[in-house]
Image (tube, rainbow, N blue to C red):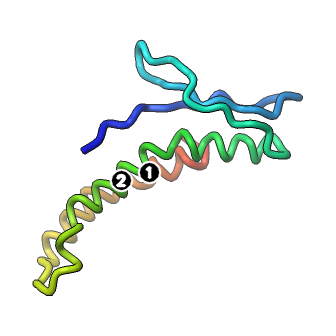
Amino acid sequence: MTKYPKLRVARACHDRHEATVMGDEPNHYRSYAHIPACGTMAATNAFAYLFAAAPRLFALLERADSDWRDAFPSDGPINGGDLVEWFAEWLPNVPAAIAAARGDE
């Protein structure tokens, strides 16, 4: 599976309604994206948080696709127990990704 960078947001504040998405790993503290003013500070920060959470959200979707890509299009049966077991392992990662996209992390 692809290794995505861990990102963090330098939020918009005060009169400057711009935000920056930075790398958040040792020796990789560089800017990945500049989010220009989007009308309000809240809107700018929302876009920045979504951008920073995108690698984590994409990794969840990529894992679901790679693990189950061939199961559903085929006419063969799907083991419900395997699907439930996989889903139970996958689901706990979802709330953290959603929280990151909302800026609640």
Question: Going by the image, does 97 lie left or right of 17?
Answer: left
Disc 2 to disc 1, how far (Cα)? 5 Å
Q: Circle 2 sits on which residue? A: 60
Residue at x-position 26% and y-position 64%: 87
Q: Are marks 2 and 1 in contact (CB under 8 Å)?
A: yes
Residue 92: quarter of image = bottom left
Q: Is residue 60 above or below residue 100?
A: below
Query: In which quarter of the view is residue 16 placed?
Result: top right
Residue 53 spot, x, y in % from top left:
51, 43
In this rendering, the answer to whether 80 lies above or below 43 is below
Q: Position of residue 89 (x, y in %)?
A: 24, 57
Of residues 43 and 65, which is closer to you in this image?
Answer: 65
Q: What kind of residue is marked 1? A: Leu
Name the foreground residue: 47 vs 91: 47
* Viewport quadrant of the N terminus: top left
Within-10-Å neighbours for mark 2: few <14, some 14–19, many 20+: some
- Which label was assigned to residue 57? 1
Which residue is painted at 76% across and 47% down in the image?
43
Q: Give residue 28's position: percent from left, percent from top.
A: 44, 18
| Amino acid type, residue under disc 2 in the picture | Leu
Q: How many marks?
A: 2
| Picture quadrant of residue 64 | bottom left
